[in-house]
Image (tube, grey):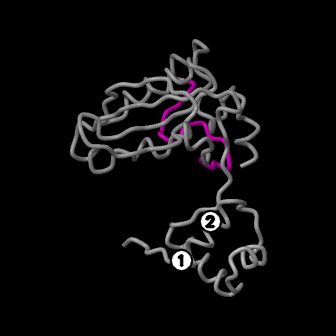
Amino acid sequence: MSHKLDEVDLKIIYSLARDARKTITQIAKDTEISRPTIIDRLRKLRESNVLSLDARVNVTKLGFKLALVALKTRTVEAEQKPETNLAVCPRVLMLMHADGSSNCFALLYGENMETLVSVVESFRSFSGIEVISWRPSETPLKVEAFELKEFPSKNKLAPCGKNCLDCSSYKKQECLACPVVTAYKGTTKMMVNLL
């Protein structure tokens, strides 16, 4: 069910869009809406997933490379849930459904081009998913920062179930591994360990 935004919701959202660190008192002063109303509206907006107040990271400022991948599902099961393996991949910043020959697009990040190539190649092994095409991408024109997936501890296997130590790209030092596995050799190691 979709949530309907009214003028009060929009004033609160616009106030937070200018500075998401504002206190309730600052939002109330900015919007001329009472504190209890703001507290109630924020609760409702967050519970309905209309509003998210998450930390986001500008991956291109960290020197990471981006790629846009067009995917197509090959099976009915994969078509119903093409995001299953992709949604858990820490390198997927955004996943979108589309119409046409590609029915899904994924925006990925990697520390270097070799790692991006390895990640795209690993998608080819996902059951029911076909990589139609992919291209390196420049910095997004509108959205520059993305929420990175949280993984509180390192594991032997990646969230998709793969063991990076068995990957030929990792063995040839072409890929730095999944950021959430113990074998990871990349620059986000410190960042992921903090999560």
| Quadrant in which the N terminus appears | bottom left
Please tell me which residue is depicted at 61% across the width and 21% down the height of the picture: 112
Give the percent coordinates (x, y) of residue 157.
55, 37
Bin the neighbour count of mark 1 within 10 Å (Cα to Cα): few under 14, some 14-19, many 20 and up. few
Q: Are marks 1 and 2 in contact (CB under 8 Å)?
A: no
Amino acid beneath label 1: Glu
In this orientation, which residue lies closer to the viewer: 185 or 103? 103
Up the image or down, 93 lies above or below 7; here it is above
What residue would you read off at disc 1?
7
In the rendering, at what x and y percent does residue 73 appear?
A: 27, 38
**Could you say which is closer to the camera, residue 106 or residue 125?**
106
Please tell me in which quadrant of the rendered image residue 130 appears.
top left
State the count of labels: 2
Horizontally, is 93 left or right of 102 in the view? Answer: right
The residue located at (48%, 74%) in the rendering is 5
Name the residue tied to disc 2: 14
Is residue 63 rendered to the left or right of residue 169?
Answer: right
Residue 23 x %, y %: 77, 72
For image coordinates 63% across by 35% down, the residue present is 179
The structure residue drawn at horizontal position 41% and vertical position 31%, both measured from the top left corner, is: 69
Q: Identify which amino acid the numbered label 2 is placed on.
A: Tyr
Q: Which residues are magenta?
A: 149-165
